Amino acid sequence: MRETVLKNIPLFADLSDEILDKISDLMQKRIYKRHNMILMEEDVGDSLFILNSGSVKITRLSDDGREVILSILSEGDFFGEMSIFDGESRSANVIAIEDSEVFILKRGDFLDLLEKHPKIAITLLQEMAVRLRRSDQQIEGLSLSDAESRIAMTIIRFAEDMGVIKMGQVVIERLPFQQDIANMAGTSRETVSRMLKMLEIKGWIQRKGRRLVITNYDEFVKEFG
Ligand code: CMP
């Protein structure tokens, strides 16, 4: 694997080409097709995963068997760090929602890297703080009684996670599928479909294929956030 591929991974930002070269020698590349299970809750965890392309959902099953989506990760994100740190089994399932290419790093190699390059550890902690904050927001959001507000909050989360701001608009290039949005907002696919149509008719959003534009992000957050 060439070190240039690793340049776009935030976890390894600012490392020299020489170090990136060494890291790339330690990693194994794997491709998962859409819907493939990458990690299974309760499995023993001994490796870290970095998503080079595609996207994955982090899920758990509710008591009544429904899929609950905790998060959706995309290019450049990492996962599988939790079992490495606490030695417990995998905390959730990780499933590809698009064809995805991952780099896999063994536990021992990863821990060595963190010791040798504390910058990686700091970036990792920053990202874990962001994820905890998002989870806190999600817990608060799920207690909202109406499905519309929960869907709007989920869209705001996607905007924060994967959106690009351009002159007051937020562009999300690949909006997750409606069933996945529903499983994240704790509602049905039909309700998501209805809500997106309503937002479109009222001019809050524009859609083309999987591309979604929030026309005035500040106002959207004021109204729905
Ligand atoms: P691990 O527990 O090893 O395996 C499942 C992974 O899913 C976990 O590490 C994290 O990388 C990721 N994960 C679990 N919960 C969340 C969450 N709430 N937000 C984002 N990622 C998560």
Image (tube, rainbow, N blue to C red):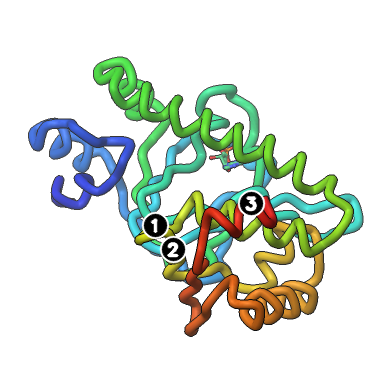
Disc 2 crowd rating (10 Å Cα; few below 14, some 14-19, many 20+) is some
Pointer 2 residue: 169
Q: Looking at the image, do the residues carrying marks 2 and 1 touch, with CB atoms under 8 Å apart?
A: yes
Q: Position of residue 136 (x, y in %)?
A: 69, 35
The residues bearing labels 1 and 3 have C-alpha atoms spaced at a distance of: 16 Å
Check the image and report above or below for 193 versus 150: below
139 left or right, relative to 203:
right
Q: Does the residue labelled 2 lie within 8 Å of ligand 1?
A: no
Q: Nearer the viewer, residue 81 or 183?
A: 183
In the structure shown, which secondary structural element does the residue marked by tag 3 occupy?
Answer: helix
Q: Which mark is residue 222?
A: 3
Pointer 1 residue: 165
- The mark lying in front, picked from 1 and 3, is 3
151 left or right, relative to 85:
right
Q: Which of 203 and 182 is in front in this view?
A: 203
Q: Position of residue 218 (x, y in %)?
A: 53, 53
Q: Which residue lies at the image location 75% right of the left edge and 56% below the top edge?
A: 150
Q: Position of residue 14 (x, y in %)?
A: 19, 32
Q: Amino acid under label 3?
A: Lys
Q: Which residue lies at the image location 60% right of the left edge and 59% below the top edge?
A: 220
Q: Which of marks 3 and 2 is nearer the N terminus?
A: 2
Q: Position of residue 19 (x, y in %)?
A: 14, 31
Q: Which quadrant of the figure has residue 162?
A: bottom left
In the structure shown, which secondary structural element does the residue marked by tag 2 occupy?
Answer: strand
